[in-house]
Amino acid sequence: MKNSPAGLALMLAIAAAAPVALAKLPPPPAPTPEAKAKAAEAAAKTAWTGKVDAYKLCLAQDKAAAAYRASATAAGKTVPAAVSTPPCTDPGVFAYVPPEAAKPLEAAGAHSPATPATSPPNSAQPGAAAPKQQ
């Protein structure tokens, strides 16, 4: 394959123009609270879908093991004892509850002064009256 001067010049022009084209791209916009909430809901939905998939896999494995045991006993083969496994847990229907929005520091009382003391931490009052000596 021959390198022509025109092809070489074109490759050099593209290589020189690439950084300029990339430098003019604007930065991505900051995510809005609505976008963050939607992303959190999508993450929760994905996690729930994973739990549903694990539940369906568990049911399929139980069904396959039961079918194997039934066919093996029908054929007269010795079947080893079943390994105890935790029962399949159904994740239920998807229900997303958005987390409570965090209060700003000013509303949370983080800058509030402590309440002043009304009495000294150790008073001179005795805890129990001492018996009188005669």
Image (tube, rainbow, N blue to C red):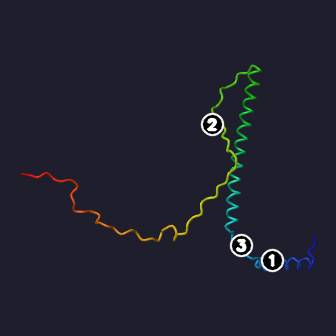
Q: Position of residue 80 (x, y in %)?
A: 67, 25
Residue where numbered disc 1 is placed = 18
Amino acid type of the residue that numbered disc 1 sits on in the rendered structure? Ala
- Identify which residue is drawn at 70% across, 53% down: 45
The residue carrying pointer 3 sits among few (fewer than 14), some (14 to 19) or many (20 or more) residues within 10 Å by Cα, namely few
Q: Nearer the viewer, mark 2 or mark 1?
A: 2
Residue 32 vertical placement versus 74 (above, below): below
In the image, is residue 88 above or below residue 36? Answer: above
Point out residue 100 in the picture as x, y percentages from the top left corner: 59, 60
Element under disc 1: helix
Q: What is the secondary structure assignment of the residue under circle 2?
A: loop
Left or right of 104, for residue 74? right
- Determine the secondary structure under disc 3: loop
| Relative to 75, residue 22 above or below | below
Task: Tell me the quarter of the image containing the N terminus.
Answer: bottom right
Q: Position of residue 12 (x, y in %)?
A: 85, 79
Write down the residue under mark 3: 29
Is residue 118 found left or right of 67 in the rendered image? left
